[in-house]
Amino acid sequence: MVSKRDSWSILVTLILLQAYGSLLIAARAQVPTNRTLRLSGLVLHHYKVHNTCRYAEVFIKHLVTKAWNKDRSITPALLRLAYSDCMVTGCDASILLDGEGSEKEAPQNSGLRAFELIDGIKRVLEVYCPRAVSCADILQLAARDAAGLAGAPKYPVFTGRRDGFRSNLKLVDLPSPSVTWDEALAYFRSRGLDVLDLGTLLGAHTMGKTRCHYIHDRLYNFNNTGRPDESMDPSLVTELKKTCTPGTAGSRTSNESTVYLNPTSGSNNSFQSSYFDHVLKNRGVLRIDQQMITTMDGIRIANEFANGFEDFRRYFALGMARLGSLGVLTGKEGEIRNSCRRTNSGKVLK
């Protein structure tokens, strides 16, 4: 468990990082100097401060730890779930809602996991603290705890989010993993994030897997050339072709076959800077990973984090805090759901 002193130490670090821009990178990359955490009413330890569920964070950490001990891939699953929630309509737990035409059904969200873990946490909290802890906060806290178990910084999460009523697959505009760096950066900027957030949060690809479907063109027919992507290390192409075979292109088998985003982390799903080493050596698995070193900003970020693990850890904490502050509902906005899969009225706005 993180001590109160350690939490405040990390908080001070986050404040300094956001106040002074990016101390090690901003001077050399095009990063705004006014990077801020838009807390919008969020506070540290909201449930303890307001005495609505004093041990909410303790319960969540305990249940996430139990799940992680059984399956370490829960960390990348939760990080992806948090990203998919926050980047669409904000961190309002819209990704958790069931229903025809909900965000879950968008093609970009295929393969999302960890819904059952969030459901289990919610059921426990409803027993001890009925209608007190939002699903939006549960998701952010669970992602933080899982990342911490994998080796990421155990950063404080500002809480007090409420759950939204809207979930519409037509609003899901998450970029494909095959986009260019400029396209990904434009998307991040449209959400109020910047180039350092993009480079840092791509570092989450140090864990987890991707389906062959997303890289098949890089291996066999990049840009309709009939050849592999020339920016990919030929030895990596050979390795990946062992799993992602040409005979299954477009088939269900191809879609379901998976490869590690970072072989060094592999099945341990550990948080490490080796992802950036791979990118610098043209061994990025997804196109967007390799696109990082097509710009000077991306090269600077990759070099900084490849050579400075603690720098990566600090900026990842700040990046997750900035991501988690997007479009939050607080105060009398939204609601606290009884179930993360349904609004309390049973109606989902489109």
Image (cartoon, rainbow, N blue to C red):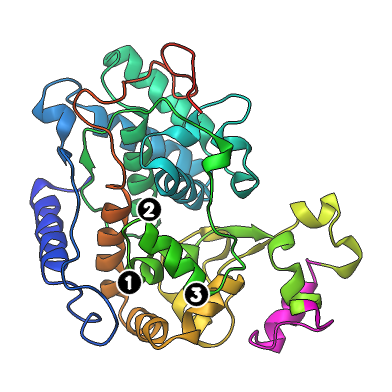
Above/below status of 234 relative to 330: below
- Residue 274, position in %: x, y? 46, 76
Identify the mark nearer the N-term, 3 or 2: 2
Q: Which mark is residue 147?
A: 2
Q: Residues within 10 Å of mark 3 (few under 14, many from 20)?
A: many
> How many residues crowd around disc 1 within 10 Å: few (fewer than 14), some, or many (20 or more)?
many
Residue at 57%, 31% (x, y): give it.
Answer: 102
CB within 8 Å, label 1 to label 2: no
Task: Say which of 169 and 69 sits in front.
Answer: 169
> Which amino acid type is marked by label 2?
Ala
Which residue carries the number 1 mark? 196
For numbered disc 2, what is the local secondary structure?
helix
Q: Which residues are magenta?
A: 224-244
Question: Residue 230: within the magenta?
Answer: yes
Q: CA distance from mark 3 to mark 1?
A: 12 Å
From the viewer's perspective, is residue 28 above or below residue 122? below
Q: CA distance from mark 1 to mark 2?
A: 19 Å
Dot 3 or dot 1, earlier in sequence:
3
Determine whether the residue tagged by mark 1 lies in a helix, strand or loop: helix
- Which quarter of the image is occupied by the N terminus? top left
**Residue 176 colored in magenta in the image:** no
Query: Which dot marks residue 121?
Result: none
Q: Amino acid at mark 3?
A: Trp
